[in-house]
Image (tube, grey):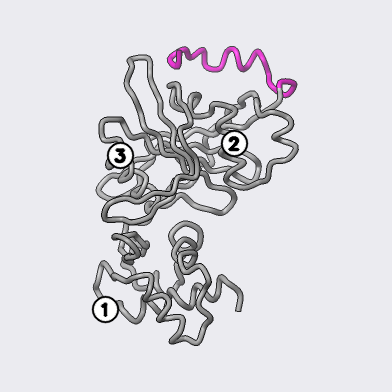
């Protein structure tokens, strides 16, 4: 049995053992995953946390679980403390790129030696965002990378991971805390990460303005940048722009200089 099918069997059985029709939350612990695996005669994953990580951030929950959700709702897995979790009903997240937005060319300032050797994963995407100051372009403020691949604890949630944290300053001197999540290919931006990122910022930087960002690299190398927020527990898009990094020879200098003659960003 491959890893994906093993994880699906475990998480599905765990949910169905505990779910009662009409419930909006189903609590469980990390140890429950181990017990369910044993009951199914499935080898216990060496990294039990990877089962949870996969369904919280990468894989959809099995159809047998989602079929119990009312129309317009979906099940998500949220942390509720140290090694404790809950299946929770949530409004369906719709954080997907708008195919009708224009693609804005940006000069590619990624060092050639980095481009030669980098991989096509989330860390390489974060690297391009950093070298090209994409957050500065998108938000119109000055930003500084403070820490990447942050793993920490949040009260009443437990352990979380944030791809990268920036701090920012605008021309009025206001300070911002900016959690960034990077997605590549078919990975989707989810409400779980947004909730965790905002909770972390509220717990540790309550005096700063929290600006959650998600960046999704499409198959054609378009970078879709989202500014997000939560509205009554539902993920909402505040702003969205599509960029593509380009070399200087491919840029139309006349078009770049006269783009809509808009100086509001200066």
- Nearer the N terminus, badge 2 or badge 3? 2
Q: Is residue 47 above or below residue 36?
A: above
> Residue 2, percent across and down?
61, 74
The quadrant holding residue 175 is: top left
Element type where label 3 sits in the image: helix
Q: Is residue 110 left or right of residue 160?
A: right
Q: Which residue is mark 3?
A: 204
Which stretch is magenta? Answer: 248-266
2 vs 29, nearest the viewer: 29
> Residue 232, percent across and down?
25, 48
Q: Is residue 168 above or below residue 259?
A: below
Tell me, yes or no, whether the highlighted magenta stretch contains residue 252. Answer: yes
Q: Is residue 31 above or below residue 176?
A: below
Q: Which residue is mark 1?
A: 20
Q: Which residue is mark 2?
A: 127
- Please tell me which residue is depicted at 63% across the width and 16% down the height of the picture: 255
The alpha-carbon separation of the residues under discs 3 and 1 comes to 37 Å
The quadrant holding residue 28 is: bottom left
> Residue 172, percent across and down?
33, 15
Tell me, yes or no, whether the highlighted magenta stretch contains residue 43. Answer: no
Please say if the residues under marks 1 and 2 sit with CB atoms less than 8 Å apart.
no
């Amino acid at each position: 049995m491959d890893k994906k099918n093993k994880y699906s069997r475990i998480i599905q059985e765990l949910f169905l053992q505990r779910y009662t029709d009409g419930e909006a939350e189903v609590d469980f612990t990390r140890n429950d995953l181990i017990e369910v695996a044993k009951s199914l005669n499935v080898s216990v994953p060496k990294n039990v946390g990877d089962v949870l990580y996969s369904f919280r951030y990468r894989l959809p929950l099995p159809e047998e679980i989602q079929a119990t959700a009312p129309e317009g709702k979906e099940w998500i897995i949220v942390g509720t403390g140290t090694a404790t979790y809950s299946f929770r009903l949530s409004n369906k997240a719709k954080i997907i790129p708008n195919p009708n937005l224009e693609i804005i060319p940006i000069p590619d300032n990624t060092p050639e030696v980095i481009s030669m050797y980098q991989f096509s994963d989330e860390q390489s995407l974060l690297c391009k965002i950093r070298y090209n100051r994409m957050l500065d372009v998108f938000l119109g403020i000055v930003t500084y990378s403070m820490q990447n691949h942050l793993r920490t604890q949040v009260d009443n949630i437990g352990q979380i991971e944030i791809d990268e944290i920036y701090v920012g300053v605008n021309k009025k001197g206001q300070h911002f805390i900016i959690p960034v999540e990077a997605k590549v290919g078919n990975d989707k931006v989810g409400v779980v990460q947004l909730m965790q990122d905002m909770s972390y910022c509220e717990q540790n930087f309550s005096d700063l303005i929290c600006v959650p960002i998600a960046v999704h690299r499409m198959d054609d190398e378009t970078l879709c940048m989202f500014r997000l927020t939560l509205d009554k527990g539902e993920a909402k898009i505040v702003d969205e722009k599509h960029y593509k990094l380009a070399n200087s020879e491919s840029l139309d200098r006349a078009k770049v200089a006269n783009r809509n003659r808009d100086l509001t960003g200066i």
